[in-house]
Image (cartoon, rainbow, N blue to C red):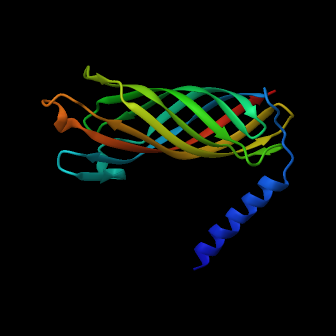
Amino acid sequence: MNKKLIVLFIFACICSLTFAANNYYDNGSQRFTISAGISQPASITRFVDDTTKTFGDTKLSIGGYGSICYQLNVHPQIALGCEIGYMFNYVIDGKLVTNVPMLFKATWLPVQGVIDMPISLAAGICYLSLSDGGSYMPFYLSAEIGLQYYFTENWGLGINSGIWVIPEIYYSASAQSKNALATFLPVTLAVTYRQ
């Protein structure tokens, strides 16, 4: 019961800040962000036998992630843009798995000013490859929330987290046993320049 009240209280605070806060951004404001951090494999679901492996059972290690993102405000609270990143994880047998996501990103900024709270949805494709030579171009979806503190008018530091979803779907009958859905939980530190 207490957890529900805490969540409700936090949600009410965010909503009140949304309606009470003055907009810092105007149409045409720009944000450039560089992020780096870790990517924790959360789950891998294989469709052929409908099994799901979570966290330590995924056979993937905690990996790293880095990205560059550019966004332009189309509304005082909404920014659109693109992001390109690089993520890596190791499989237990030592193979390196890399992802290069190329995403269209939409961000809602309900709290903005000295402190920003970006809430983002992104979709695109990623180049996924294994060190043994296999590669694939699956879809890539992400939902993230962050908290950024601007120590000057233009420069800010922040932290982001969320969930990334990578469906690996093969259409040929011989490869359909490889169909799977992977999810990752990122935690990244971000440096943002805005103008």
Q: Position of residue 3 (x, y in %)?
A: 59, 73
Q: Position of residue 14 (x, y in %)?
A: 73, 58
The residue shown at (86%, 34%) is 153
Left or right of residue 107: residue 30: right
Above or below 118: residue 67: above
The residue shown at (54%, 44%) is 143
Left or right of residue 85: residue 106: right
Q: Position of residue 2 (x, y in %)?
A: 61, 78
Q: Count of labels shown?
A: 0
* Quadrant containing the N terminus in the rendered view: bottom right
* Along the viewing direction, whichever of 35 and 110 lies nearer the viewer: 110
Determine the image quadrant of residue 140: top left
Q: Position of residue 174 (x, y in %)?
A: 12, 30
Which residue is farthest left? 174
Left or right of residue 45: residue 183: right
* Along the viewing direction, whichever of 189 and 164 lies nearer the viewer: 164
The residue shown at (17%, 49%) is 49
Above or below 172: residue 39: below
* Along the viewing direction, whichever of 133 and 24 lies nearer the viewer: 24
* Quadrant containing the C terminus in the rendered view: top right
The residue shown at (69%, 41%) is 158
Determine the image quadrant of residue 165: top left
Above or below 181: residue 16: below
Which residue is farthest bottom? 1
Left or right of residue 87: residue 147: right
